[in-house]
């Protein structure tokens, strides 16, 4: 199964609340933060909403399991 590597490349300061929540929902908080996420339609939809703020690429291997808080 493939995964997605997502990196925050631009600041989300001054952006609409929906975009800020989407970026934090991807697990990105500061510029240059990177996360390996599962390749699911939900994650791809979130990336599509903030594509002007992030860069992403497909990587081989499974995404790490989510941590429970």
Image: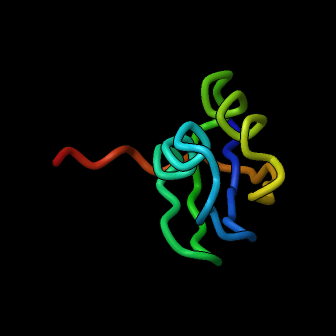
The residue lying at 74 percent from left, 50 percent from top is 60
Q: Tell me if 24 is positioned left or right of 51 in this view.
A: left
Q: Position of residue 34 (x, y in %)?
A: 60, 67
Q: Position of residue 40 (x, y in %)?
A: 64, 27
Residue 36, quarter of the rendered image: bottom right
The one of 23 and 7 positioned closer to us in this rendering: 23
The residue lying at 64 percent from left, 77 percent from top is 32
The residue lying at 59 percent from left, 65 percent from top is 13
The extreme left residue here reads: 69
Q: How many discs mark residues in the rendered view? A: 0
The one of 18 and 2 positioned closer to us in this rendering: 18
Q: Quadrant of the N terminus?
A: top right
Q: Position of residue 33 (x, y in %)?
A: 57, 72
Q: Position of residue 4 (x, y in %)?
A: 70, 48
Check the image and tell me how it is coloured: rainbow
The one of 68 and 10 positioned closer to us in this rendering: 10
The residue lying at 73 percent from left, 36 percent from top is 49
Residue 2, quarter of the rendered image: top right
């Amino acid at each position: 199964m493939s995964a997605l590597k997502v990196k925050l490349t631009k600041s989300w300061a001054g952006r609409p609340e929906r975009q800020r929540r989407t970026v934090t929902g991807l697990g990105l908080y500061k510029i240059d933060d990177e996360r390996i996420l599962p390749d699911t339609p939900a994650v791809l939809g979130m990336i599509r909403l903030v594509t002007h703020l992030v860069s992403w690429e497909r990587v081989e291997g499974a995404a790490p399991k989510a941590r429970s808080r």
